[in-house]
Image: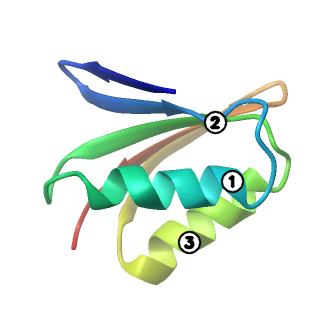
Amino acid sequence: MIEISESGKTLDARGLFCPSPVMQTNVELSKMQIGEILTVLADDPAAEDDIANWARKLGHEVVKMEKNGNEIRFEIKKIK
């Protein structure tokens, strides 16, 4: 589910498991402009490493990552 607010887009990938959170993050970030931030919510334990590594590999910036219980919140800035 995608939600758009003044602060950018939010991708709710909770309830999805590898590789879906990374794949959906890739799709949504590809639709965005350079400099925009995508917030990703996930609860797949593998998402913490998968999304962070994917973003760095493609040259995007993980501005923030927070864990709250089993939920992970990423803020990813599109760089390229």
Per the model, the C-alpha gap separating discs 3 and 2 is 15 Å
Identify residue type, mark 1.
Ser
Q: Is mark 2 on a helix, strand or loop?
A: loop
Q: Could you say which quadrant of the image residue 38 lies in?
A: top left
Q: What element carries label 3?
A: helix
Residue 15 drawn at (x, y percent): 79, 31
Which label number is shown at residue 48?
Answer: none
Name the residue carrying label 3. Answer: 54
How was the colour assigned to the protein in this rendering? Answer: rainbow
Circles 3 and 2 in contact, beta carbons < 8 Å: no
Q: Which of marks 3 and 2 is in front?
A: 2
Q: Could you say which quadrant of the image residue 9 lies in?
A: top left
Per the model, the C-alpha gap separating discs 3 and 1 is 13 Å
Circles 1 and 2 in contact, beta carbons < 8 Å: yes
Residue 50 drawn at (x, y percent): 69, 64
Q: Earlier in the sequence, mark 3 or mark 1?
A: 1
Circles 3 and 1 in contact, beta carbons < 8 Å: no
Which label number is shown at residue 20?
Answer: 1
**Which residue lies at the image location 49% right of the left edge and 82% below the top edge?**
57
Q: Earlier in the sequence, mark 1 or mark 2?
A: 2
Q: Could you say which quadrant of the image residue 29 lies in?
A: bottom left
User: Quick one: label 2, few (<14), some, or many (20+) residues within 10 Å?
Assistant: many
Q: Earlier in the sequence, mark 3 or mark 2?
A: 2
Residue 31 drawn at (x, y percent): 25, 53
Name the residue carrying label 2. Answer: 13
Against 60, is 69 above or below? above
Per the model, the C-alpha gap separating discs 1 and 2 is 8 Å
